[in-house]
Amino acid sequence: MKLKLMAAWILLVSFVLVACEDKVPVKEFSKAKGAIDLALSVKADQYSPLEMKEANDQLIKAHEVFIKDEKYDDSIKNSEIAYNKAMEAYNKSAVLYAADAMKKADEEIAAADSVYAEKLSPDLFAQAKDLYKSANEKFEAKEYGSTATLADESAKKAVKAREESLDNKYQLQVKIDEVQSILSKVEKYDYEDYAGEKYKIASSKVSEAETCYNDENLKEGFEKIEVAKINADEAFKDTMEGITAKKIQEAEDVVADAEKSKTGSASEEDLAAAKEALTNAKNLKSSGEYDESITYANEAIRLGNEIIDSGKKGTVAVANNSDQTDKDKTAGEGKDKSGAKVKKGFVSEDEDYYYYKVRSWEKYEDCLSSIALKYYKNAKLWRKIHRANNIKNPDLIRPGWIIKIPKIKK
């Protein structure tokens, strides 16, 4: 149809150039042709195909009637019909064309929003939204051509905003890694006792954020990682508050025992140093410097234990502090089951138990878990040792204690 119309138009122009007659309806032909072009600019051939076909047919007929039959009046009449049909097609199509342009812009903005363009491509995203707002105002004013133009520009900006956002999606991964790092610190301690629920929420939200990252649903991913971060921070704080308070309490107990058993001026100096370390531990805990607080608390414990050991003048402390058997005493004197002397820091044994002399945490990191790992290759079996020795506080074992390690029967 387009080729046929173009051929008729060329033929008409050629005729005009060579025609001898003065009466040629060029104005009417041009007006109809302009209306058809206007209708095509809003895709009238798609939205109003019947009216467009009629407009084209009437313009071609106008050309043919004038050129072949030289019917001037009929040619003008056909041109007017072509014009009216083209304008009818334009008026019907323009609103649909503008609406579709708005719909496309809206979809592209939504796609950009889903990858958090508001954060990751703020300039382009803001431009897309501003253009969309202007397009909507033109639509309300029934300026459909301007609506479509602005909406097309809005869609293009939104597409670029989405592309830029995807280029910057690594920022979500950085936040995911940050939260995972906090959770890994929490996992080093018995967080279940202090922040089990918050840890669970943080861990779950991190997993969901990772899924969003992989699915390029970045906005939701950022929302989830923010929730994860809040809970991870609180889990870390609550856990460290609990752990540090427990460690400081242990240090207070040791320093109190040390004060009761101090002997000589050297003990006075060490006791003063232990008290100072304990004060530092408390102050650091108050300011949220938990690792440093634990370090000072351990120093207070170390100094206090040295005072206690020196006050005992070589007497060996027993783990249960009351139920030591003759067999335990023999072990405490540095002999194995055959009665032979063994070196300081020995490990003795009998048919049912090993006997282990506790060393300092600061140098050897001795605790029930590490001792269980040494004997059972499984740190989680520390409760067997706890039960066998009547220890009141499993976190408070002191250097010099002789503890029984139950043998696992094969």
Image (tube, grey):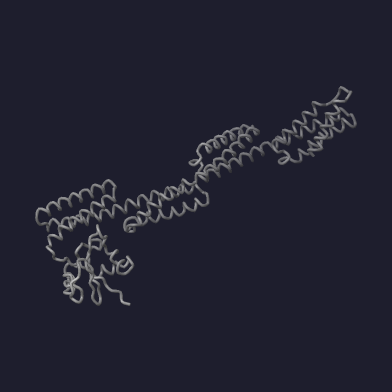
Residue furthest toward the right?
69
* Image side of residue 75 versus residue 46, left or right: right
Residue furthest toward the left?
264
In which quadrant of the rendered view does residue 324 lie? bottom left
Percent from the top left, x then y, of residue 332? 17, 69
Q: Nearer the viewer, residue 267 or 381?
A: 267
Quadrant position of the C terminus in the picture: bottom left
In which quadrant of the rendered view does residue 307 lie? bottom left
Q: Nearer the viewer, residue 169 or 354?
A: 354
Residue furthest toward the top?
22
Percent from the top left, x then y, of residue 391? 22, 66
Percent from the top left, x then y, of residue 310? 13, 60
Q: Nearer the viewer, residue 375 or 39?
A: 375
Number of marks in the rendered image: 0
In the depicted structure, whether residue 25 falls above or below residue 378: above
**What residue is at 30 percent from the left and 67 percent from the top?**
374
Percent from the top left, x then y, of residue 57? 81, 37
* Image side of residue 303 versus residue 1, left or right: left
**What residue is at 10 percent from the left and 57 percent from the top?**
263
Judge whether residue 22 can be spotted in this image. yes
In the depicted structure, whether residue 99 falls above or below residue 373: above
Judge whether residue 319 can be spotted in this image. no
Quadrant position of the N terminus in the picture: top right
* Image side of residue 260 versus residue 34, left or right: left
In which quadrant of the rendered view does residue 322 lie? bottom left
